[in-house]
Amino acid sequence: MCETETRPLEAEVLVVGAGPAGLAVAACLAQAGLRAEIIERNDTVGSSWRKHYSRLRLHTVRQHSALPHLPFPADHPRYVERQQVVDYLARYADKFQLRPWFGEEAECITREHGRWLTRCRSGRAFLTRSVVVATGANGRANRPAFPGEEGYRGRVLHSEAYRDAQPFAGQRVLVVGMGNTGAEIALDLARNGGRATISVRSPVNIVRRDVLGRPVQVTSMLLSHLPHAWADAIAIAFRKLTIGNLRPHGIETPAMSPLRQLREQGRTPVIDIGTVDLVRRGRIAVRPGIAAFTLEGVRFLDGREESFDAVILATGYQAEVQRLFPQAAVPVQDKGLPTPVSGSGALAGVYFVGYDVRQPGGVLHTIGQQARQVTAQIAASRSASEAAPDGVRVAT
């Protein structure tokens, strides 16, 4: 059902989500003299950051990770810690007097008489000229099902439920998936008393977080200005020099460069902060994909069976943006991530911020750019509407 129980609250702009993307857009709009209403399904800003595992740090440097109009404190480390990001987002909301409607989850967004009607699950509704969808890429945990899982005697959890290694001390733990989350959870387990194994199903691009003191983020941003063929060749050379051949340890390397895979597939390389070293030293084991669960563990695709006390699924997320728009198809790519920043046609007046994972500067850096872009477009649209002769409706 998608019904309205109360009279819609009218506003210029509605921002859906109070994470980094939603806060950045709302702050930029405020700086431009445009007030936005913000809805957030949880009870605080930056809620996803509060739930991440404890050891998480940004992989992007402080200077290129701050949101518009408020840098991170100068005394923060180069790679800001999770709790520091949480505190920063709270300060950001306070500085720009952003007051979201907490506990309000958007249920559907429809076009009504030239404006956008956003209905919430609570029955509250908002009627606005523009809507900025900023719910983040981690809308719903991607939870694959495996044969035999129902009979497994151990514990199975998605990585979103992982906080730290303490509950797994002394246990045999299988981490399924070697993206950044899987690689870091395995590292955390291995360094803190767990016996970690990673199940790696397909080739993985891995890069060092820093090479000769230079952050890989900064290097990739510089390389993005070169012709693709040159940049890819340099990136492959750096990968060979710093990571080398991991095939003897069970990890295959893609033929394409990390930059090309990011650019064309939206797949961020694993930013290594120590996992590769522990794999080479045998402290983190590597196995192929899972064929099925057994009573005590799993059987891998190579036929080998091993016992595990717990299995952590680092299998990613789905953005789940399309469900909000029953009347229009949202152009999306893998994992349900919207491809446009500015909607067109049936989605004119709708903006999508925080879903572009293909830029070398990282998501937070891209969010800052998109927030400014969207603000400029909304301000221009309002100016055009105000300048139109009476009785003439300007499309938004």
Image: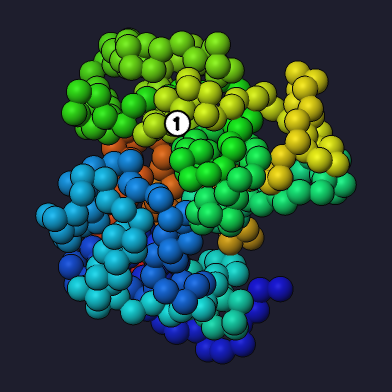
Q: Quadrant of residue 196?
A: top right
- Looking at the picture, tell me which residue is in the foreground, 215 or 23: 215
Please tell me whether residue 263 is drawn above or below residue 130 in the rendered image: above
Across and down, in percent, residue 371 comes to: 29, 55
Q: Which residue is drawn at 39% across and 70% down?
A: 45
The scheme the figure's colours follow is rainbow
Q: Which residue is drawn at 27% across and 51% down?
A: 80
Please tell me whether residue 158 is drawn above or below residue 127 in the rendered image: above
Left/right placement of residue 52 relative to residue 383 reads: right
Across and down, in percent, residue 71 comes to: 16, 57
Across and down, in percent, residue 340 comes to: 43, 44
Please tell me whether residue 153 is drawn above or below residue 200 in the rendered image: below
Q: Residue at x 43, y 55 (%)?
A: 54
Residue position marked by numbered label 1 in the rendering: 275
Across and down, in percent, residue 102 comes to: 46, 79
Amino acid beneath label 1: Thr
Q: Residue furthest left?
A: 74
Q: Residue furthest bottom?
A: 6
Residue 384 visible, this angle:
no
Quarter of the image with the C terminus in it = bottom left
Quarter of the image with the N terminus in it = bottom right
Q: Quadrant of residue 241?
A: top left
How many dots with numbers? 1
Left/right placement of residue 150 relative to residue 157 reads: right
Q: In which quarter of the image is residue 243?
A: top left
Label 1 residue SS: helix
Crowdedness near tag 1: few (<14), some (14–19) or many (≥20) residues, C-alpha within 10 Å: many
Q: Which residue is drawn at 50% across and 72% down?
A: 42
Residue 152 visible, this angle:
yes
